[in-house]
Amino acid sequence: DSGVTQTPKHLITATGQRVTLRCSPRSGDLSVYWYQQSLDQGLQFLIQYYNGEERAKGNILERFSAQQFPDLHSELNLSSLELGDSALYFCASSADRGWLGTEAFFGQGTRLTVV
Amino acid sequence: SQQGEEDPQALSIQEGENATMNCSYKTSINNLQWYRQNSGRGLVHLILIRSNEREKHSGRLRVTLDTSKKSSSLLITASRAADTASYFCATDATDYGGSQGNLIFGKGTKLSVKP
């Protein structure tokens, strides 16, 4: 158990809909990362938050948004869903020792299926 | 975009044999990490090697880093059926000599260890 909790584990929704994925980081970790994993694109970095503020942005679509709350949990919002958004969405957290970098701890992921 | 590229894409060996996976990356890094993913599950951190280190060991794992060639290798000795998984290298994005914190993953090597 990594200590990172993601809910829900599975989500099936229709095209055009909006969903929210939730992540609780490991206790004490200030950084939260979101990744999308699909068969053809591999693991794509979407966005990182550090202590409530956006720190780095990757290949995140404009239809997607995220935030980190004061209690450090994070939510990833996906809207106007398309079939191609079907993927595993992972959240990870790290203690983030600043410039040195550190290992990330991953949740078990949310499997999103858009039908 | 991918930073690391693993090679081979797939590897099948017998239990007891050694498995070697390679990773090449494109830009300067502060550290390189290896992760394991069992089918459809979250990634598990294996080992982190910093840019000023050349080799690191952890149990049956041995990682090397050659910054001049921008490459790393992961060796799993005396493999077991339980080592069957996908293995990813991940590098941190650097920013003015420091780490941005987010990890960029390669597409992974799928290792199959037959009993």
Image (cartoon, grey):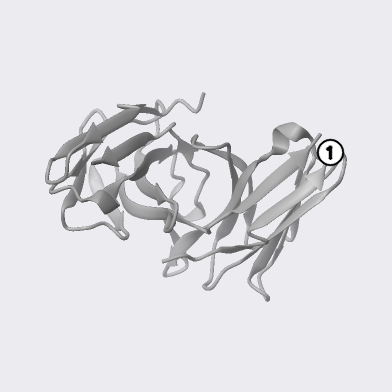
Q: Quadrant of the C terminus of chain A?
A: top left
Say above or below: B6 vs A47: below
Residue at 59 percent across and 57 percent down: it is: B32
Secondary structure of the residue carrying numbered label 1: loop
Residue at 35 percent across and 34 percent down: it is: A110
Front-most of residues A60 and A110: A110
Residue A51 can be seen in this image: no
**Chain under label 1?**
B
Quarter residue B59 falls in: top right
Say above or below: B22 vs A15: below
Percent across and percent down for residue A102 are: 51, 46
Kind of residue indicated by mark 1: Glu
Quarter residue A31 falls in: top left
Quarter residue B83 falls in: top right
Residue at 35 percent across and 45 percent down: it is: A87
Percent across and percent down for residue A12 are: 25, 33
Residue B109 can be seen in this image: yes
Task: Please give left or right for residue B71 compared with residue A107 in the image.
Answer: right
Percent across and percent down for residue A42 are: 46, 55
Q: How many marks?
A: 1
Task: Please give left or right for residue B7 compared with residue B56 in the image.
Answer: left
Percent across and percent down for residue B87 are: 62, 48
Residue position marked by numbered label 1 in the rendering: B15
Residue at 53 percent across and 57 percent down: it is: B107
Mark 1 residue crowding within 10 angstroms, few (<14) / some (14–19) / many (20+):
some
Front-most of residues A50 and A46: A46
Residue found at the very far bottom of the displayed protein: B68
